[in-house]
Structure formats: C-alpha cells, structure tokens
Amino acid sequence: MSDIVKGIIGGGWPLLIGWILPAALNVLVFVLVVLPGAGLAGARGISQDGLLVGLAAVVVGLLLAAVQTPLYRLLEGYVGWRPKVGEPHGWRPGAVLERWRRRQIERRQVLLGRVDLVELTQLEDAGRLTDADDRERLAEVRADPRLEPYRADLARSASQLGLLRERLGRYPVDERQVVPTRLGNAIRRLEEYGYDRFRLDSQRMWYELSAAAPERTTKQVEQARTTVDMTIAMLYGNLLLAVATLGCTLVAAPGAWPLYLLAVAAFALTRVWYELAIRATDDWAAGVRSLVNLGRQPLAEAMGLRLPDTIAAERDMWSKVASTVARPYHPRRAALDKYRAAPPEQTAEELGSDPPPTGQ
C-alpha cells in the first residue's frame, strides 16, 4: 500500500490533481444533481454506488489526460489554422483563426506601445532619454492614433503599470510567434524563451533539459503545469456537463427549468476557467525560465559540451546542437566539435590495467 501511495505522490500526482479530480467534480454533479433531477430510471441506484461513480470519474479523467495535446491545441488556436495558399478567404476555420491572429498581433502592439509610452516619458521627464532610438520610439508612440485612448496610463501608479507589463508579458517576444488565441500566446511565450535568449530549443530538447536540470526546477515546472491542466480539465469538464445536462433534460424532463439553468451556468463557467488558465501560465512560464537558466550548463556537460564564455558563442553552440538533433547527420555538423569538452582523464584502475612502473 505504501508503494502505491508513493507512486501517486511521485509520478501520478499531476495526473490525479490535474485531470482526475476535476473530472470527479463534474461526474458527481451529473450523477447527484442532473440524473435525479431528470427523473431517469436507475439514477438513485447509480448515485448511491460510490464505487461506480469513482470509476466513472477515473475513466473520464484518464480520457481527458490521454487527449490533452489536441485539447490544448484547440484552445491555443492551432486546430484548423494556416489556410491553404490560393484558397479564397471566407468563414473557413483557417481564415477565421488568421484574422484572430492579426487581432492578437494588434493587441500586443498596443500593449507594447502603452508600456513604451509610459517608460520613455518617465525617462524623458528625468532627463535620461539620451539614446536616439529611444527618442525615435517615443515620437512614434506619441503619434500612434491607437494609443490616444490610453493617455491616462501616464498617471497610473507603479502597481497598475506592473499589471500592464504583466499583460504584455503574456505574449511572445517575437511577433512572428503570435498565435490566434490569448491562451496560445501565453503558452507560446514560455516555449520561445530558451530559443529567444540562448537559441536553446527547449521544446525539441525538453526531455534532455528536464533530465539534466536541477530536480527542484523540474518539480516547479511540473507543479505549475498541473495547475494549468486542472483549469483546462475543469473547462472541458464543465462543457461536457453542460451538453450532457441539456441532453438529459430535453429527453427526460423538458419542463425542469433548474436543469436548464445548471447547463447555462456550466457553459458560462468555461469562460472563467479559460481566464484562470491564462493567468496560471505565469507560474508555468517562470518555471520554464528557471529550467532554461539553471539547466543550460548541466545540459551542456551531460552532452559532452563546454559552455562558451560569451552569449554570442553560446547562441551559436545551441543553434548547432538544435541542428544536430533536428536533422540527419551531415559533415557540416562537425562544426560543433569546437564546443566539445575535453574527455576526462582516466586512472589506471578505470582502464583496468596495472599502474605504470615507477623508476628504480
């Protein structure tokens, strides 16, 4: 029994908290409220069978966990995106999502302009706006008509400006990485962190990086990801609950208006869980940032490489590593040799031979 508990706490805890627990909550509402309210036969017996309810919760949770990648991709805006070249634009999913993406780009540009306007104006008022590029940027944001409604930002407090920067921080640094939805952008910013700063493709090398990084950082990422998983599971669970409630009510109890209200409430809560999921990615992004910052050197050592002394050289090294991992071997991959660490010296005992004789 103790081994089972250790297994749950060690490897199954994210699964239990992130997917099975939210599924259990929605299954309980369906079994204890919806089925009796609809007057379905056998509802009372099912509601009293705790083992059956628990089994149903586990099955639903495992199913959600098994398809979590497409569930995430749907909310991130990847499903149906990128319309085919040459096709007329219309109300196809790809065309709609591309319009959403352009809207997200514009929102990011407005947020960036608002932050730059406040920060550069403060530098100008303090007499520290000396860089020509900064002066040009300040003139640009002042002339931007999209920022006219936000002139009041200049009177905001430091904490309010911090919240504004927090909203901007939920977008990728590179505008080309922007995707159609806010949740997708909030996740994309943590996916691009390693590559943007160090050219370390953390997505492609996730398992190597996780294995080499300090254990505490990997646990932090896992815990933060579990929180996001839980909100996503609650979102889809409430959506399924709303559909199931509506279906049962229409079939078995068309006049049970409280069940209609429950279906509407469950559907409305999906928006709440979506917003919470976006905010929960902040801890996830911080965990990935820590994983990349603290795991780069152990990863390089584990791969037999020597971390260069300069950022420019390090970016070159990780670019070559990504190329080696992503593509088949080619003689030009030997350019990575200059970053290889010298092999450790082996003792005579490690070589399995007698030590050399000493001088007489």
Image (cartoon, rainbow, N blue to C red):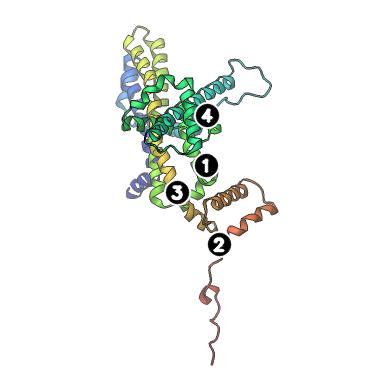
Mark 1 surroundings within 10 Å by alpha-carbon count, few (fewer than 14), some (14 through 19), many (20 or more): some
Question: Which residue type carries mark 1?
Answer: Asp
Q: Are marks 2 and 4 in contact (CB under 8 Å)?
A: no
Dot 3 or dot 2, earlier in sequence: 3
Dot 2 or dot 4, earlier in sequence: 4
Image location (x, y in percent) of residue 5:
33, 46
Q: Are marks 3 and 2 in contact (CB under 8 Å)?
A: no
Image location (x, y in percent) of residue 39:
33, 13
Dot 2 or dot 1, earlier in sequence: 1
Q: Are marks 4 and 3 in contact (CB under 8 Å)?
A: no
The image's mark for residue 179 is: 4
Question: Which residue type carries mark 4?
Answer: Val
According to the picture, the residue beneath numbered tag 3 turns out to be 293
Q: Are marks 3 and 1 in contact (CB under 8 Å)?
A: no
In the displayed structure, 315 sits above or below 92; it is below
Q: Are marks 1 and 4 in contact (CB under 8 Å)?
A: no
Q: Quadrant of the C terminus?
A: bottom right
The image's mark for residue 323 is: none
Question: Which residue type carries mark 2?
Answer: Ala
According to the picture, the residue beneath numbered tag 2 turns out to be 341
Mark 4 surroundings within 10 Å by alpha-carbon count, few (fewer than 14), some (14 through 19), many (20 or more): many
Q: Give the residue at x 43% y 20%.
A: 148
| Front: mark 1 or 4 | 1
- How far apart are labels 3 and 1 at the CA level? 12 Å
**Towards the viewer: 3 or 120:** 120
